[in-house]
Image (tube, rainbow, N blue to C red):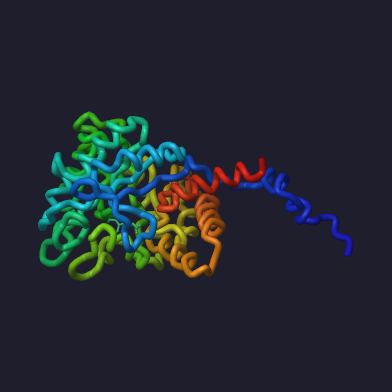
Amino acid sequence: MDPIYRPRRLRVNQAIRSLVRETSLSVNDFIYPLFVVEGKGIKREIPSLPNQYHYSVDMLGQEIKEIAALGIKAVLLFGLPHRKDSCGSEAYHEEGIVQRAIREIKRIHREIFVITDVCMCQYTDHGHCGIIEKEYVANDVSVKYIAQIALSHALAGADMVAPSDMMDGRIGAIRKILDKNGFTEVSVMSYSAKYASAFYGPFRAAADSAPQFGDRKTYQMDPANSDEALREVELDLDEGADVVMVKPALSYLDVVRKVKDAFRVPVAVYNVSGEYAMLKAAAAKGLLDERAAALEMLTSMKRAGADLIITYYAKDAAKWLKEEYDEFV
Ligand code: PBG
């Protein structure tokens, strides 16, 4: 036994491990999802998402200040409207829940980067992400509504819009309506490769957005495919997407890597509700170390090629990363 190469030499202590580390996670990578509800004085824990809350607009102040103090610079907004109908009209209403939340956040903290989820499923009485015609989510008419929703968010002051509906051609339609109305600097993060995943379960309970009939498989992607993901990303980039997203994260890190290698553009991943809830449940049972496991998961997303990470762990991870930094000192 006389090896020349001993890889363990670069693992002997924390200092050398830090020096050779290829991937470092930072609070700059995180986007924190926020759920806004109608009403007043509400900060209510979401049963399906432990330690995540529903906030009424008037209660956002404290939360935004906390997020900013942790160094988190971006939020992704979801709204729960007081009324649903067949075409999701609350989604593009000037006084809708998201539109009011955007204005309130910008009033509290102008520098917080406000991203909005652009979709119809929380707003439609049937729970699908578009307009139903003959029991099918009709593409082109849905895109017209989705573009209108994106414009209403820009008018309210959103910095970036993130369509999550998976209709064909919606990125081009959104880019066009934004530009036509003078919002050339509002960027588009496309949920480009969004899979029809079982890991959205806790979110749908939190956002009251489960489809009332059928499923989302005619618009969200088959988990078995990755060539299709590259095609979706290519189309969205051609139509003007600034950032492309792969969602969920953990079961799709191979797709993240392929997208990054193929296109060399900013790639986002969504560490979705089911991934968060899964870890929370295991940690609650004492089955694993939540801090270590969560940081490992987030690091793996970055290593796979993600530049932006949307995660319910953003606040915890920001604290943990700071602790790690302080621990060595
Ligand atoms: C809306 C939307 C969903 C998620 C983000 N935007 C749910 C869905 O498509 O069913 C899921 C987020 C999560 O699970 O954390 N279309």
**Residue 62: percent from left, percent from top:** 34, 40
Indicate whether 15 appears above or below 280. above
Residue 94 image offset from top left, x and y in percent: 14, 39
Quadrant where the C terminus is found in the figure? top right
Q: Residue furthest front?
A: 41
- Tell me: 31 left or right of 147: right
The image quadrant of residue 218 is bottom left
Residue at the image position 10 percent from the left and 56 percent from the top: 85
Residue 93, x across and y down, in percent: 13, 43
Splitting the image into 4 quarters, where does residue 115 fall? top left
Q: Residue at x 36, y 60 (%)?
A: 49
Horizontally, residue 135 falls left or right of residue 58, namely left
Q: Is residue 105 left or right of residue 251?
A: left
Which quarter of the figure has residue 24?
top right
- Along the line of sight, the residue nearer the viewer: 87 or 58: 58
The residue depicted at 38 percent of the width and 43 percent of the height is 243
In the picture, measured across the screen, residue 183 lies left or right of residue 194, that is left
For the question of whether residue 226 can be seen, the reply is no
Point out the image quarter for the N terminus. Answer: bottom right
Residue 201 seen from this side? yes
Question: From the viewer's perspective, is residue 57 above or below residue 252?
Answer: above
Query: In the image, residue 109 lies at what x, y percent?
Result: 33, 32
Q: Nearer the viewer, residue 10 or 12?
A: 12
Residue at image position (36%, 35%) is 112
Number of numbered discs overlaid on the protein picture:
0
**Ligand 1 image position (quadrant):** bottom left
